């Protein structure tokens, strides 16, 4: 490694990770997460890795309940999340299934995003 004048170190040229924003709005392929009275609510098939990172950060900073809520909003959008919240017949088992699937999708994507 070579020294930089501000006392930080950097990897040899070409070894560091470079990020370039894609300006992709994230509206790629979607899959149905749940259906209420014939209306399908979808989430991205392959969410961006930063969605998983935000979820993990929220778990650490604000706790599981808020983290799960934020995750569902990130995946479903406000309308989809509101539909779930407003569904009077929602059971704890239903909510757990939706939550578990959402977590697996974002954390699975996060775990495999850096692997070839």
Image (cartoon, helix red, strand yellow):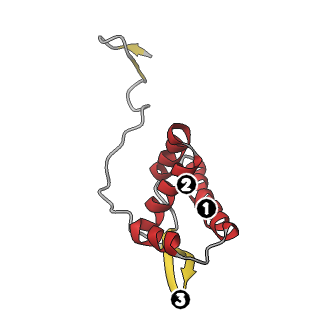
Residue 88, image quadrant: bottom right
Q: CA distance from mark 1 to mark 2?
A: 7 Å
User: Callout 2: few (<14), some (14-19), or many (20+) C-alpha neighbours within 10 Å?
Assistant: some
Look at mark 1 in the image and give the residue it sits on. Answer: 99
Residue nearest the viewer, comparing 44 with 10: 44
Tell me which numbered mark, 3 or 2, is placed earlier along the sequence. 3
Residue nearest the viewer, comparing 39 with 88: 88
Look at mark 3 in the image and give the residue it sits on. Answer: 38
Please say if 3 is above or below 114: above
User: Callout 1: few (<14), some (14-19), or many (20+) C-alpha neighbours within 10 Å?
Assistant: some
- Judged left or right of residue 5, residue 15 is right
- Judged left or right of residue 27, residue 36 is right
Tell me which numbered mark, 1 or 2, is placed earlier along the sequence. 2
Residue nearest the viewer, comparing 92 with 44: 92
Residue at 66% of width from left, 63% of height from top?
96
Q: Position of residue 13 (x, y in %)?
A: 38, 27
User: Callout 3: few (<14), some (14-19), or many (20+) C-alpha neighbours within 10 Å?
Assistant: few
Tell me which numbered mark, 1 or 3, is placed earlier along the sequence. 3
Q: Position of residue 76 (x, y in %)?
A: 46, 67
Identify the disc placed on residue 68: 2
Residue at 39% of width from left, 32% of height from top?
14
Q: Position of residue 49 (x, y in %)?
A: 48, 51
Q: CA distance from mark 1 to mark 3?
A: 20 Å
Query: Do the CB atoms of the residues marked 1 and 2 lie less than 8 Å apart?
Result: yes
Local secondary structure at mark 2: helix
Q: Is residue 116 visible?
A: no
Residue nearest the viewer, comparing 28 with 70: 70
- Judged left or right of residue 18, residue 61 is right
């Amino acid at each position: 490694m070579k020294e930089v004048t501000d006392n930080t170190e950097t990897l040899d040229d070409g070894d560091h990770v470079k990020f370039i924003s894609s300006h992709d709005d994230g509206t790629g392929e979607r899959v149905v997460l749940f259906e209420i009275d014939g209306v399908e609510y979808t989430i991205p098939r392959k969410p961006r890795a930063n969605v998983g990172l935000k979820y993990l950060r929220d778990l650490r900073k604000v706790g599981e309940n808020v983290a799960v809520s934020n995750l569902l909003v990130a995946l479903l959008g406000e309308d989809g999340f509101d539909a779930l919240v407003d569904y009077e017949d929602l059971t704890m088992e239903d909510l757990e299934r939706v939550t578990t699937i959402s977590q697996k999708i974002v954390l699975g994507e996060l775990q495999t995003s850096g692997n070839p």
